[in-house]
Amino acid sequence: MKKNFILIEGIPGSGKSTFARFLSNQFERNGRACRLFLETTYEHPIIESTGREDDSLFIKSFYDRWSKFLDNLPEDEVVVLESAFLQSPIVHLLHKDADRELIKSLIMKVSNRLSMENCTLIYFYQKDAPAAIDKMLKARGGREYLLHKHNEYKDEPYFRNRIEQGPESHISFFLEYAVLAHEVVRELTISTEIIENSFADYGSYQKYVLEKLNLKHYPDPVLEASLMEKYSGLYHNREMDLTISVEFINDGLWIFGNKSLKPKSSDQFYLDDISATVRFITDKTKVTGILITEKDLYANRNDHGTAFERIS
């Protein structure tokens, strides 16, 4: 039997993570076993956490990771992957200023392998790429974000070769990424749904994709405000000596300062932009702690989850 894949791709800030989480939830609510891999998933089967200076080593490793993952994947579940098919190889090899045709050939090689499975790519793009990238930069902090990216990656060949541009070389990088991705998408051998998302009408995009995938839409459960208010408080992990706050604001729960907790059930919540699920632990009617599950680079790296005890 063929394996079942949904790939979510697009330029940074195009809503990939949120859409991937939405589809994962919908598969589960339609009775389909589903595994979700976001860009930040810890021990990601495809995306490497460390770079490789040698292009040929990266290319071999990238394809081998896909092959190993496909060979060992159960046939009775759906896998949703965000940024693992296009963004990962393009960003890495573009940082190395690799030959653009070499980048395309790697993606096409993986595409040919995936074409033997039940695989659909959902690709978000915007006709006006400069405007989309400018919007993304402003949303992430504007000039400060640009300077941060410059300091982080200025020693990569792409930016060394454009040293005269300074931090603006990262705008050139994002633009070239968008052009390269859009070119290769048109040549792929897998089923592809191309969605122009300039208007950010994600309700329409969700409806369209669910119809294509023959899925019924199940919204998040609606919880009483009084129940969610009970979950607000401070939670502490002794091993890390770390305290996190869960706040009840505007009839919703927030964690890590600005991350919205969205309900999966009466006691379990998800974050739609990082790979983390939060379960509230209760002893009869008293909330005693939280357990953060799903393996993520920033929230939880443990197979059994990361537990926090309620302290107030």
Image (cartoon, grey):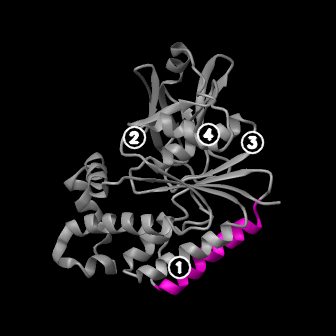
Which amino acid lies under the numbered mark 3 shown in the image of this protein?
Arg
Main secondary structure along the magenta-highlighted residues: helix
Q: Would you say the residues marked 4 and 1 are in contact, meaning their CB atoms lie under 8 Å apart?
A: no
Label 2 residue SS: loop
Q: CA distance from mark 4 to mark 2?
A: 17 Å
In the picture, the disc for residue 105 is 1
Label 4 residue SS: helix
Residue on which the image places disc 4: 210
First along the sequence among labels 3 and 1: 3
Q: CA distance from mark 3 to mark 1?
A: 33 Å
Which amino acid lies under the numbered mark 4 shown in the image of this protein?
Leu
For marks 2 and 3, give the one nearer the viewer: 2
Q: Would you say the residues marked 4 and 2 are in contact, meaning their CB atoms lie under 8 Å apart?
A: no
Q: Position of residue 204 (x, y in %)?
A: 49, 36
Q: Any magenta on residue 129? A: no
**Magenta stretch bounds:** 54-73
Q: Position of residue 124 (x, y in %)?
A: 46, 52
